[in-house]
Image (cartoon, rainbow, N blue to C red):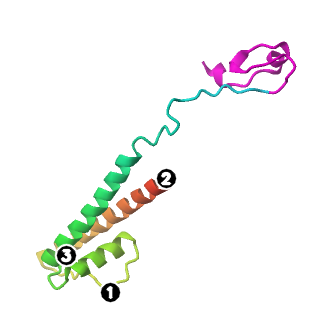
Amino acid sequence: KMREFLPMKSSEAENGVKGNGGISNGKSKQKRWNIPLTSKPFQGFENLQSTIYYCTLAISLYFFLGILAFPFWLEPKWTIIDALYFSMTTLTTVGYGDLVVSGGSNLRGILGKAFVSFFNVYAVCISVSALGVIAKL
């Protein structure tokens, strides 16, 4: 089977042997390759649409989680716009530092720090995944 993908030997080309799918008239010493054609020209892009769908879903879930968690649970002083802004700066790994989740020694501060730690890791993971999908395009 591996022989199918190797070039014709020069002796085959000189003798007019039609090995490897190459067409030879006996005079040509040019190597010919037998590359099988597939019925699908864009093979490997079947799942690209579903991958884009899942990346969009993951980013939407990220923003929705940020909208719910920050103004309603962690930082009651923040508006929904502040939560979106914080989520966007975290997703793009900019992190200006103008909005910071206040932590404390109480249970809300400890859970808030833990949530933001996982929130940031999730942001980096989905942004890298989205860049990988864009690179496939």
- Please name the residue shown 49% across and 33% down the image: 40
Mark linked to residue 33 = none
Q: Position of residue 13 (x, y in %)?
A: 81, 19
User: Which comes before the other along the chain, label 1 or label 3?
Assistant: 3
Q: Say whether marks 3 and 2 touch (CB < 8 Å).
A: no
* Nearest the eye: 71 or 54: 54
Give the distance between the C-alpha atoms of the residues marked 3 and 2, in whole angstroms.
34 Å
- Please name the residue shown 27% across and 64% down the image: 62
Q: Position of residue 18 (x, y in %)?
A: 74, 15
From this view, report whether residue 38 is shown above or below residue 11.
below
Q: Which residue is mark 2?
A: 137
Q: Quadrant of residue 22?
A: top right
Helix or strand or loop: what does disc 1 sit on?
A: loop
- Please name the residue shown 31% across and 62% down the image: 59
Q: Which residue is mark 1?
A: 98
Quadrant the N terminus occupies: top right
Q: Which residue is mark 3?
A: 70
Give the distance between the C-alpha atoms of the residues marked 1 and 2, in whole angstroms.
35 Å
Helix or strand or loop: what does disc 3 sit on?
A: helix
User: Which comes before the other along the chain, label 3 or label 2?
Assistant: 3
Magenta residues (range): 1-30
* Nearest the eye: 67 or 115: 67
